[in-house]
Image: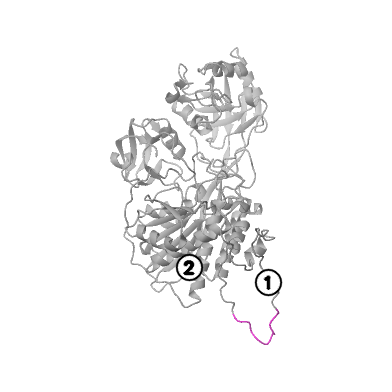
Amino acid sequence: MRTSKPLVAAALLILSVAPARPQAIGEWGRLGGAARPPAAGRPVAAPVPARAAKPAAKPARPAAPLALADSAQELAIVRRLADPALEGRGASTAGIEKAATLIRSEMERIGLRPAGPGDGWGEPFEVTTGVEVGTPSFITVAGRRLDEGEDYEPLGFSTNGTLRAPVVFAGYGITAPGFDYDDYAGIDARERIVLVLTNEPGEMDSTSRFDGTVNTPHAELRTKAINAREHGALGLIVVNGPRWHAGEPLRRPRADGGGYMSGGLVAALLADSIADRLVRRAGESLAQAQMDIDNVTKPHSFTLPDSVTLTVTLRRTRSKVHNVVGAIPGRDTTRVLVVGAHYDHLGYGGESSLAPDQHVPHVGADDNASGTAALLGTAGLMAQRMKGGWRPEHTLLFCAFTGEEMGLVGSSHFVDDPPRPLGSVEAMLNMDMVGRLRDDKLMVMGAGTAEEFPALIESANRTAGFQIKTSSDGYGPSDHSSFYKKKVPVLMLFTGAHADYHKPSDTWDKINENGLWRVTRFAAALVESLDARPRPRFVQAKSDSNVGRIAGGGGYGAYLGTIPDYMQTEGGVLLSGVRSGSPAEQAGLRQADVIVRFDGVGIDNIYDYTFALRSRKPGQQVALTVRRDGVLVTLNATLGRRP
């Protein structure tokens, strides 16, 4: 599940229910290694005897589809997808391709038909996955050249080029009216290189006005870069503050993750020992300058006597990825239901990791191997029904999306270039983080996107017996949003947040096996009910502030209510929609508008937009410049408070 928000820990207890009937695990269990040790009191599946070879004279009959119809088989899928050997299923890893192959194999085993372009399984597209440092990349300080390495590293969001300019020390590089703090007050950063410290004033000090034990968004390097750019700076040098981080090694730009969108200026990291030499030329040490700020939480910025030369060369890397799409053909080929789940995750971490210092596979068992397993389990249950003579009225498309963690790019690609006409898609059911059921509590989002959905959910739950909490809104940080913005009714299943979210500790052994299987059966019941009904009537649902964000808790700061299209990475922020009743809708913002300026801040990408929004308060009126049909239009909006 994609997010740029902080986690509110909501640790979920594993729910104990009656054990599933014993059954052999099958192919996925063999791929995943040894089977999971049986829980206490749970029958152990009998071993499957080797099948004797058929006589050569008799041609073998085609094997009947083997539907996935057991909680142990479903858990084996989670375990295999969450194997560290699949490298966290990051877009730039070999593991994402292995995961796609395994999903395709399971779809074939179940008996689905390939349903991608050209009657293939895959729906391929390219994504930008990261950056690599090229040559030349160096800094010249006081006539001394330092090449990329232990003393100097480009930042992944830097622009390419060579810049020679005077330097100003701007403390922590923060402008935060809400904290009554501005490092740029009293200094001129125009056409200069700004030297700033990492983090915030009062780091490790719980009494700091910035709450030193928890970073605010002002600590983010991108925020510092955009703030420097908005003050007229041409370049940025970031240094670890020696008070807490003296001598720490510099980090290379990540080869994977979202650090490929330009910050709009030349930017690099510099070792604290080298930065100290620069600051001493102004009569102070770097350590003393930091202490002067921290002791009173008051800016202490000044101009340095030297100029430096920054040279950065970065290469953006691209990878080919693909959605995996299988189908059960229906009686009416003009009617389609989509069941979806994303199978990608964070790879070895990256900007979305909540354990950013751990460059290890973020295996994503709940997020979202669980949803992928439920997708395949739902397909297996449908295939099992077909063996009894049933055939769906609709064509059922089972879509394993990739690129969700990068901004819903896989599902966005699907709806922009669908393998079936999008007008034939009557509804979409999405499953994301469905593996940690607690106390029978299941969230169903999108309940307000079709008139029939509340009754449909209630009917399907009579047998399932969940304590269901519904949200009307069809927007949210998962793949159903891509369909909802195209006016397709959507439902999304979610079992709740937990402390392992976006961390390497989201492992397969923490999955509630029987709870996951119950969610799968509920999903199958929803699909069967949708299949038996007339086309649901789409409703533009109201935003639901009670739900908050997927990882738990409410939002941070001001709220506008725009829905960005993450496929566009530069040239402004393209809107794929606006939330009903939001300040954006009231201001006249529309789908397909491109925001290029936000209250004086130039907007080139989503990071610029986030910076501008975070720097404003609820209740403020802001001027927005959008490009609409090739013409610049200025609109005024009054910001709300984020749900």
Position of 536 compared to 527: left or right? left
Labels 1 and 2: the sequence-earlier one = 1
Mark 1 or 2: the one toward you: 1
Q: Quote the CA–CA distance across marks 1 and 2.
A: 29 Å
**Residue that numbered label 2 is attached to:** 327
**Which amino acid, by three-letter code, is at mark 1?**
Val
The answer to which quarter of the image holds residue 559 is top left
Magenta segment = 52-61
Q: Is residue 53 magenta?
A: yes
**Disc number placed over residue 439 in the picture, else none:** none
Residue 215 screen position, x and y as percent: 53, 31
Residue 252, visible in the rendered structure: yes
Residue 122 screen position, x and y as percent: 52, 62
The answer to which quarter of the image holds residue 632 is top left
Front-most of 456 and 313?
A: 456
**Residue that numbered label 1 is attached to:** 48
Residue 337 screen position, x and y as percent: 41, 64
Q: SS at mark 1?
A: loop
Front-most of 216 and 149?
A: 216
**Which amino acid, by three-letter code, is at mark 2?**
Ala
Query: Image quadrant for the C terminus?
Result: top left
